[in-house]
């Protein structure tokens, strides 16, 4: 399996959180230009990257009920989606801030079909896929665990969305897809369920 170390994420930027919130909207069109590895690194870090240690517990960029951390982030790269990453499916190793190339074949058409042929997936050079292992959280919270996992996926999606706005990238949260078809397209392990698709691309020229 190929492992790709990602550039360190930036801890500062020129767009304030307030500005990013004020301009945020779902943006469904993309330029046909590849995404830089620096952008990939920043977006994946915003999704689930390591931040700091508190009371001996390593924290991530998005909160997690009881620090159970049920989410795993994948990156689907379309043909010509990146100059540094071959088309296929990568898993974000948050501990090492690295990508593991899980699938070495392009699955872009399958992911598009699984997403009800939405153009927002078809046209995106990359799609971040938020998946969850419900059991991790439900073991600790039998009553509310499922709800917590969904809340966490929302936290991740908003982090990614705001970083996109701050970096001039387009994204749109996508929840309309066939669960089993996404799982098959990405060859997800049985314990993981796909919850959210976040296609990302550069803004088209006006
Ligand atoms: C849970 C969820 C699922 C969504 N699924 C889709 C989708 O499958 N396709 C799509 O084009 N937009 C999808 N959207 C985007 C909404 O249509 C969009 O957020 C809404 O129109 C409000 O617009 P705004 O995001 O620009 O504020 C989804 C949004 C959410 C929160």
Image: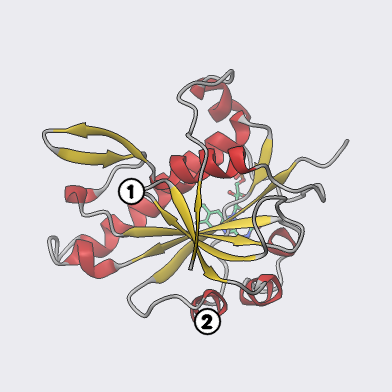
Q: Quadrant of residue 115?
A: bottom right
Residue drawn at (49%, 78%) of the image: 187
Q: Secondary structure at mark 2?
A: helix
Q: Secondary structure at mark 1?
A: loop
Is 82 above or below relative to 106?
Answer: above
On the image, the x and y values in percent for residue 155 come to: 39, 45
Of 146 and 202, nearer the camera is: 202
The CA distance from mark 2 to mark 1 is 26 Å
Residue drawn at (70%, 47%) of the image: 201
Disc 2 or 1, which lies upstream in sequence?
1
Determine whether the beta carbon of the residue marked 1 sits less than 8 angstroms from the nearest atom of ligand 1.
Answer: no
Crowding around mark 1 (Cα neighbors within 10 Å: few <14, some 14 to 19, many 20+) is: few
Q: How is the image coloured?
A: secondary structure
Count numbered badges in the picture: 2
Tell us which disc is closer to us: 2 or 1.
Answer: 1
On the image, the x and y values in percent for residue 152 come to: 34, 51
On the image, the x and y values in percent for residue 82 come to: 70, 52
Of 175 and 59, nearer the camera is: 59
Q: Quadrant of residue 60?
A: top left
Q: Residue furthest right?
A: 206
Is 55 above or below relative to 145?
Answer: above
Disc 2 and disc 1 in contact, CB within 8 angstroms = no
Left or right of 20: which side holds 70?
Answer: left
On the image, the x and y values in percent for residue 21 come to: 54, 29
- Find disc 2 in the rendering and name its residue: 184
Determine whether the beta carbon of the residue marked 2 sits less than 8 angstroms from the nearest atom of ligand 1.
Answer: no
Q: Which mark is residue 196?
A: none
Is 71 above or below relative to 114?
Answer: above
- Quarter in which the C terminus is drawn: top right
- Find disc 1 in the rendering and name its residue: 95
Left or right of 146: which side holds 32?
Answer: right
Left or right of 135: which side holds 122?
Answer: right
């Amino acid at each position: 399996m190929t492992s790709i170390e990602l550039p360190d994420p930036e801890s500062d930027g020129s767009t304030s959180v307030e500005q990013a919130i004020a301009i945020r909207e779902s943006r469904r069109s993309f330029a046909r230009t590849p995404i830089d590895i620096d952008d990939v690194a920043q977006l994946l870090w915003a999704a689930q990257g390591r931040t700091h240690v508190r009371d001996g517990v390593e924290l991530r960029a998005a909160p997690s009920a009881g620090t159970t951390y049920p989410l795993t982030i994948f990156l689907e790269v379309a043909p010509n989606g990146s100059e540094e990453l071959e088309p296929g499916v990568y898993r974000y190793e948050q501990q090492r801030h690295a990508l593991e190339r899980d699938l070495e074949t392009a699955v872009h058409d399958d992911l598009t079909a699984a997403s009800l042929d939405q153009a927002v997936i078809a046209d995106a050079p990359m799609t971040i896929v938020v998946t969850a292992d419900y059991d991790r959280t439900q073991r600790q919270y039998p009553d509310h665990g499922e709800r917590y996992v969904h809340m966490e996926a929302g936290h991740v999606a908003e982090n990614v969305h705001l970083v996109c706005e701050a970096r001039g990238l387009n994204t749109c949260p996508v929840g309309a897809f066939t669960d089993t078809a996404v799982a098959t397209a990405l060859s997800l392990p049985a314990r993981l369920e796909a919850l959210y698709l976040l296609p990302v691309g550069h803004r088209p020229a006006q």
